[in-house]
Amino acid sequence: MTSKRYAQIVGWGKYVPGQVLTNDDLAKMVDTSDDWIRTRTGIVERRIADPRETTSTMSIKAARAALQVADVVPERLDLVIVTTATPDYLFPATACLVQDALGARRAGAFDLLAGCSGFVYGLGVGSQLIISGVYENVLVIGAETLSRIMDWTDRNTCVLFGDGAGALLLQASDAPGGVLSFTLGADGSGGDLLMLPGGGSRHPASAETVAQRLHYARMNGREVFRFATRIMGQAAKEAIQAAGLKIDDVDLFIPHQANIRIIESAAKHLRLPMDKVFVNLEKYGNTSCASIPIAFCEAIEEERIKPGDHLVLVSFGAGLTWAAAVVQWHVPLPAPRLPGWKHLLRHIGYRWVWLVSRLRRTYRKFSSWWGQAVGRIRGNDNG
Ligand code: ACO
């Protein structure tokens, strides 16, 4: 008889850019105030990527941290999923850039786009690929550089969002726990409520789309708010029920960090006291797909999670989409620190991987040039 498999979270890591943009800074850019943003959203400041940082560079940092916590080498990864609405490029997938930088030679890699619900969607997909016996180690990353798609003259959107990345490593285990259940949902009729209109096949990038500012995110905040307050509690209830649990069994609720009023409304719907709810949106704003994994890492850092705890993750976002998952924590905390020599080896390993990738690229260019040169010489000889 084969024993049942579980998908445990064994590694976690986050990265947030160093540059802080406060509400007061924003009040100098658009017609808003610290008081309005704090009272309407709960956000106090957010992080902004510097010009050299992108979704892939932040993902790589979060991913390396997660692999380090778990003491898993990148060669053992079977799959890298990057959940994001702000990939480095439309293609190649940001996940491939991450796979290359990690040196995850055996891993498949793809991006997953499901608005801010992307990370919980990714956790659902990744956990099933483990539970079904297909994979052993799946890295799920949530990362965003939302500052690049913000219209910094539109106070309705630019005050809400921030940049960052978080990663969780899922691993096969026969110890009960890990991702116990999840629920995914979508209602495309609300697609126009939150969208990036330009740059896709509907409105390919052109001087006209830029002039019309179609390359910036647009949102009907009021309608998204109404949807979010309705769906968060409902999705959480569904996932809790699917895990065979009751709301009283929930030890920590880690919601998408979009707006404190949405979070409080979901907690009220579930009759959960706020001391069972993790909130860090005052520091980072809404980092879309990165918000839950960053919050997850901080809940661990703040010792809000202990073995045996039932955690509920819930998010909503563009699409419209929603998703919730129940996780039973298994790993002893705090995680043991890697010895210094292992850190050094990892560092050297990543430099080596970088060099090999550059050499491959150079070899491809050279062999393509060589092929063309030989073809030209042969052509001249024949002619
Ligand atoms: N500063 C000052 N005033 C503002 C600002 C601002 N930054 N933004 C809007 N206002 C004004 C509006 O213009 C409006 O003025 P009006 O009445 O003269 O038209 C007034 O404030 C009230 O606007 P509302 O939309 O009613 O404000 P509300 O209380 O709903 O808060 C908010 C707006 C914060 C955007 C809220 O609706 C919200 O959080 N919505 C959800 C947004 C969200 O979570 N989006 C992310 C989805 S996840 C994803 O996939 C990325």
Image (cartoon, grey):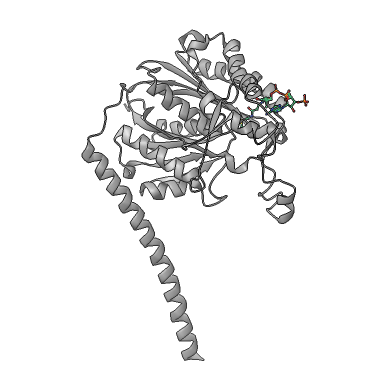
> Residue 153: horizontal and vertical position, in percent?
69, 39
Residue 78, by quadrant, is top left
Number of dots carrying numbers: 0
Residue 102: x percent and y percent? 37, 46
Q: Residue at x 24, y 40 (%)?
A: 342
Position of 345 with respect to 180 (left or right) is: left
Residue 325 visible, this orientation: yes
74 or 137, nearer to the observer: 74
Pick whichever, 306 or 165, lies toward us: 165
Where residue 101 appears, as percent x and y from the top left, is 39, 49
Is residue 245 visible in the rendered image? The answer is: no
Residue at screen point 30% across, 41% down: 73
Quadrant of the rendered image holding ligand 1: top right
Residue 319 vertical placement versus 230 (above, below) = below
Quadrant of the frame with the N terminus: top left
In-image side of 152 versus 211 (left or right): left
29 up-or-down from 242: above or below: below
Name the residue located 55 percent from the left edge and 29 percent from the top edge: 45
Left or right, residue 220 beside residue 117: right
Task: Tell me residue 334's x, y (percent).
Answer: 31, 23
Q: Is residue 20 left or right of residue 336?
A: right
Measuring 59% from the left and 16% from the top, which residue is drawn there? Answer: 266
- In front of the other: 256 or 170: 256
Q: Indicate whether 127 appears above or below 326.
A: below
